[in-house]
Image (cartoon, grey):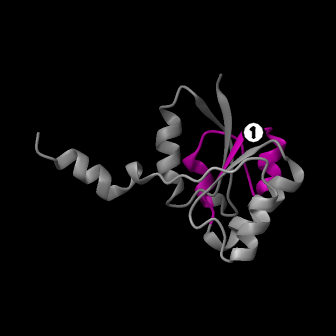
Amino acid sequence: MTYRVALCGLGDVSQYYLHHLATSKDFQLVAACDPDPKRWQKVKVPVGYDVHFLLSCQPDLVIVAAPTQLHYEIAKCIQENAAKVAILLEKPAALTMSDLEDLYAGCACCHLASHYSFADEIQWMAANRQK
């Protein structure tokens, strides 16, 4: 099965996701959104201004790589409008504990993960380690 992925935010952090999605057999980028149309050329999928556009593309998963101060608002919108869509929130997930608790309360299932393997310093270490 191939999962349909939408990417919310096309700034610097999104480049990691775009790179890995481009080579994945299990995940297909189907849509993206960013309020800055100058960033839209980074992808070859339909692009819109906001999360409502992403949800209209019926993704299985939305990756929220928008600025931190927007994480709660975006994730809450997804929860309220597309409850079955999985959400991957960049860190930090929210700015306040109450916002985080509210998001957690709205989750059918919650897993925490960190992707240190994609961090620049880990990539450098892997490329330069002694064999």
Say which quadrant the N terminus sits in: top right
Farthest residue in the right direction?
Answer: 81
- Residue at (25%, 53%) from the top-left corner? 124
Answer whether residue 115 is magenta in the image.
no
- Name the residue located 83 percent from the left edge and 59 percent from the top edge: 77
Outermost left residue: 130
Question: Which residue appears farthest toward the top when viewing the image?
Answer: 1
> Would residue 16 appear left or right of 26 to someone viewing this image?
left
Near mark 1 (Cα within 10 A), the count class, few <14, some 14-19 or many ≥20, is many
Q: Is residue 58 magenta?
A: yes
The mark total stands at 1
- Residue beneath disc 1: 59
| Residue 16 x/y as whole percent | 47, 50
| 43 relative to 70, above or below | above
Residue at horizontal 77 percent and vertical 55 percent from the top = 51
Q: Which secondary structure lies at badge 1?
A: loop
Q: Which residues are magenta?
A: 38-66
The quadrant of the image that shows the C terminus is top left
In this rendering, the answer to whether 39 lies above or below 26 is: below
Q: Is 27 displayed left or right of 55 in the figure?
A: left
Relative to 101, residue 23 above or below? above
Q: Amino acid at mark 1?
A: Pro
Query: Looking at this view, is 115 or 39 the one in front?
Result: 115
Say above or below: 1 vs 117.
Answer: above
Q: Position of residue 99 (x, y in %)?
A: 75, 72
List x then y, in percent, for residue 61.
Answer: 70, 42
The quadrant holding residue 29 is top right
Direction from residue 80 to residue 101 in the image, left or right: left
Residue 78 position within the rendered picture, expressed as x and y whole percent measured from the top left: 80, 54
